[in-house]
């Protein structure tokens, strides 16, 4: 087997679609978040930046430093948000057929939100959408999603 068949860096760096699964029905809901993988250069850069910040705080504390739960949460939220490149949603007709793809997602009835870093962070931070955050986070960490097809 050629190792190139298991090389995840290309798709990790270009990003792939994470199709969201509705938590009630357990079927795809037509919404996709486009994300970079854990083997991307951006992921590695962000992890290094977080480690440098932690080491600086440790140095200032003159020894052992443990991040607060709030700091850990903020780091995880920033990492996930920074790896999210966009989203879209299927437009479905009355018969359930996909007729188009909209570059925004419907949060509330009739409220469409275009992608932005701020909007992604707000969705990931919202406890009512924790299932989205969990799905996207698990997707990013699963290298199988970034293998060449």
Image (cartoon, grey):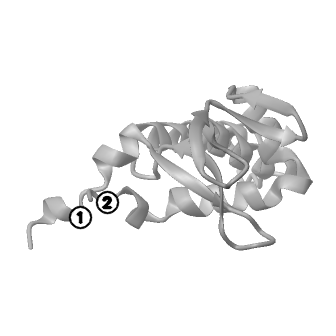
Image quarter where the N terminus lies is bottom left
The residue located at (57%, 36%) in the rendering is 100
On the image, which quarter does residue 60 sit in? top right
Query: Which comes sooner in the sequence, label 1 or label 2?
Result: 1
On the image, which quarter does residue 116 sit in? top right
The residue located at (51%, 41%) in the rendering is 48
Residue 119 is situated, as x and y percent measured from the top left of the image, at 77, 31
**Residue position for label 2:** 147
Dot 2, how many residues are within 10 Å of its Cα: few (below 14), some (14-19), or many (20+)? some
* 86 left or right, relative to 24: left
Q: In the rendered view, tell whether residue 3 sits above or below residue 129.
A: below
* 146 left or right, relative to 126: left
Residue 31 is situated, as x and y percent measured from the top left of the image, at 65, 48
**Residue position for label 1:** 6
Q: Nearer the viewer, residue 15 or 141?
A: 15
* 109 left or right, relative to 94: right
Residue 88 is situated, as x and y percent measured from the top left of the image, at 61, 38
Q: Is mark 2 on a helix, strand or loop?
A: loop
The residue located at (65%, 36%) in the rendering is 56
Q: How far apart are marks 1 and 2 (CA)?
A: 6 Å
Q: Nearer the viewer, residue 133 or 44?
A: 133
Dot 1, how many residues are within 10 Å of its Cα: few (below 14), some (14-19), or many (20+)? some
């Amino acid at each position: 087997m050629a190792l190139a068949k298991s090389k995840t860096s290309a798709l990790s760096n270009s990003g792939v679609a994470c199709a969201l699964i509705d938590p009630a029905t357990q079927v795809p809901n037509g919404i996709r978040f486009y994300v970079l993988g854990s083997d991307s250069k951006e992921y590695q850069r962000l992890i290094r930046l977080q480690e440098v910040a932690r080491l600086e705080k440790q140095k200032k504390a003159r020894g052992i430093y443990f991040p607060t739960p709030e700091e850990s949460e903020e780091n995880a939220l920033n990492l996930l948000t920074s790896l999210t490149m966009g989203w879209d949603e299927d437009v479905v007709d009355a018969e359930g057929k996909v007729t188009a793809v909209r570059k925004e997602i419907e949060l509330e009835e009739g409220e469409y939100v275009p992608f932005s870093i701020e909007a992604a962070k707000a969705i990931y931070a919202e406890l009512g959408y924790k299932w989205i955050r969990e799905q996207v986070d698990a997707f990013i960490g699963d290298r199988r999603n970034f293998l060449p097809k």
